[in-house]
Image (cartoon, rainbow, N blue to C red):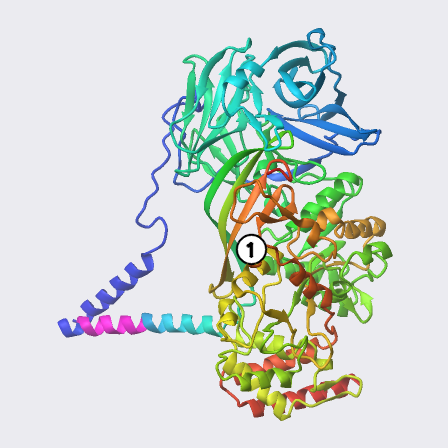
Amino acid sequence: MKRSILASLMVLGLLFNGIAVQAAAAREACDHTNIHSFDTTTSISYSYHDSNGTTCRITKREYFTTYVCSDCGTIVDTIDHTSTDHSVPGCH
Amino acid sequence: MSKKIGGLILFLLFSLTACGQPGVNDVPVPSQAESDHSTYDWKTEDWRHSDEMYAGGTYYLEKYISGLEYQPEQEYDNSFSQYRCWGANFYALSKYSTRADSSEQKFFYLSGYEDATGEIWHQHIELPEMEEYGNMMLYVFSFDIRNPQEYVLFVNVLEEDKTQAYLAMHFSIEGEFLSAIDLYPTMQANEGSILESSTGQIAFNDVYVDGEGHYFIIAGNRVVVLDAEGKTLANLAWDKEDSNTMHVMKTVQGEPIFELYSNAEQERCLVMYDSETNQGRFFTQQLPYSAPKAIDKDGILYYGNNGQLYRWNLHTGDNGVCFNYEELGLGRNSLMTYIAVSDTGFPLILDRSREKAIICKLGPEPGEEGDPIYLASLVKDSSFINSSAVMFSQEHMEHPILMQQAEGNLADFRTRSMADLIAGNGADIYYVSGEDMRTLYEKGVLADLSGVLDEDLRESLYEGALSCGVIDGRQIGLPPQAYVTTLLVSDEVWPEENWTLEEALDVMEEHPEFEKIMTSRRYMAKINALRLLLLQDLPNSPFLDMDAGTCDFDNPLFIRALETVNEATGDNSSPSIMKDGGAASFYPNMESFVDFSEELSRMGEGFHPVGFPTEAEKGNYWNADYFLVVSAQAEHRELIDAYLASLFGWQRQRELSHPVRNDILEKSIVYMDDYPTELPWKYSTGGGQYHGLYTKPDGSPWTEEYKDILDRAVSRPQNTYYIEDIILEEARTYLSGVKTAKQVAEIIQNRVQLYLHEQQ
């Protein structure tokens, strides 16, 4: 009984391992030319500033952009960014 | 026994396939509407969440509204507009200033859009004479709407540039002066309500009013509430450190709601004034940071997040995306985006980040606008094209430009759209990939756009970028964006400004410590490395003579190049590999100046652009991924051409990360020395958006280096795509180990030579 169960589990293991290897091979064979990206924010901070006589609100955002191959899902790049949104252009 | 084994396998298979599927083990708890919706009060009851799929419906663009800002006939040097929202209405206070004979004159207009009637009105603001202030100067600083019948101007009273009073002046909506109260003493007593710059100039924080005449002064980390006579009633604040306050929306009764945000704890909440308890009423739901928001009388909360408009029914808990405004190019700066809600419960969105405010009204069905010009986008991201179409259409409402985009599968939409165009139907303008542009050109369905951009405009564009859309000497497509491909090399390894393929391969041989002949930060497959190194300028390579109709791929140099690509390319590396002497050359990210600056800061100084190997002088090439093309049967060509030309105007182009205008870069770089940040140099894409720039060791931006690459770039041949495809197809068999480099070189030689013979 135990041998049979172990044999069954081995078969299942081989089956899933084969699927995983095929998936990895598919990713390696991919050219990664079809890319999409998305941003992930890591922190936000707000502040108020005077801007030549007007009040201005500034949102500072730290985020990273992840570039992913749309065909195979491989992450091909990540870039850190810092950006600010100002309620009045040029205020600081 | 076999039955037991089979059962075990089946059980394991079932369990494994069931894992990860939502809902199998988590049966959603139905939302419990314990009280009748008509009696639900979002101000006092819980804001609910539902685990069920969003059922609130999808909204559509019903129409655009333009003309909110007043356009004065008299000339002015500067203008600035502020906006407020009350119910379904938008209001704008526009300030104009002219400078004549060293004195500055200002004039003000109040404008309003009233959704119930669709009316837009403008009113010149004339401040009354106030005896107690004699000849002092009155400067309108800000405003708010008390209700649709009354507005309040906040006026700075100055004597010799020193504030004497800060008046809240009440007017009827027709412009009749009603009353005034001086808020200056109260604001002076509340730290944070008045800001002072390093030059001593003061600015007043925003003040809001409600229907009862209460005043709400933003004072740093709290809101000070005053009664109609200016007496302090309450402070709306919380005890979290390093907090800021901003106004976010008003209720349908005109009560202002504020957001408190703690930088230290990264937490936020909403707060409003409760006149019964004389305290703040807090709502602790963590809504997206500085997101535009609006709430209607039925407790439906609308808020924006990453370009999506969410509709949250606070009573039932139903919450989900009802509209994608990012596709229209709206909402890129959340601080410049506002939401109103009509009496029928549908939202309106105002985006003030461009030269004129764009207002779009949403509804349950798409609206029908006049006699539209159709623009079909066969590309995933066309937000720039869309927002430009909206801006253009605001001035040409008789023939607005309407976008057609895939609502489901993009590939299916693309196939149908191209088939329609080839069959003589379809849209007027298309936004397509380069490959699709060439396919449509070969079918003979595209118009010649050679005369669309006049000479003056063309002078401000990179000619090499435009040439990406030239086929057979004609401008078939116009690329709104383009980027340059180049290679960077160490000054010590190769001091020249260009190199041939043989020279590049010799550098690799002379430096056995180099692992790669070419690498990049982004993952690059070997086939892409081959395309970049060998195929960007085939007519100027030793392998192809288009004029003679001959080729020579079956030679040792080509074989040697194939082998080097296979051994010394692929994968990715940090830019610091160049500093460490691990690669012969680096392929930089040229898709934006911001990202380019970050890479070069990692690489350091001592490198220069050598370009890709070529027998010609320059190996930096212009590339464009997407083009605007026009159907040969399109009508309204004058308007279409005007729209296309508008995409290359300065205001439009500056929004792009890799514009084709040659006068954007320097004007977009700013230094903000009094704003505490580790990246004081910034790149502006307009609309109040700034991106931090990494710099050279001396603290200056990489401007000259980037511009030098763009200025030296040339167009690459547009008549060798078929040959390139042959080479890439055969090269794959070598890179995958099926054939040897020599075998592949022979096959390529035969196929390309046959193709050249057929062309002759």
- Is any atom of residue B105 visible in this view? yes
Report crowding for label 1: few under 14, some 14 to 19, many 20 or more residues within 10 A (C-alpha).
many
Q: Residue B351, relative to residue B206: is it above or below?
A: below
Closest to the observer, B490 or B84: B490
Closest to the observer, B33 or B674: B674
* Direction from residue B498 to residue B103 in the image, left or right: right
Quarter assignment of residue B109: top right
Quarter assignment of residue B92: top right
Residue A47 spot, x, y in % from top left? 52, 35
Closest to the observer, B605 or B636: B605
| Mark 1 belongs to chain | B
Residue A11 falls within the magenta-colored stretch: yes
Q: Residue B540, relative to residue B243: is it above or below?
A: below
Q: Mark 1 — residue?
A: B694
* Direction from residue A32 to residue B429 in the image, left or right: right
- Assign the N terminus of chain B to one quadrant of the image: bottom left
The type of residue carrying mark 1 is Tyr
Badge 1 element: loop
Q: Main secondary structure of the magenta part?
A: helix
Residue B539 falls within the magenta-colored stretch: no
Q: Residue B618, relative to residue B69: is it above or below?
A: below
* Residue extent of the magenta highlight: A5-15
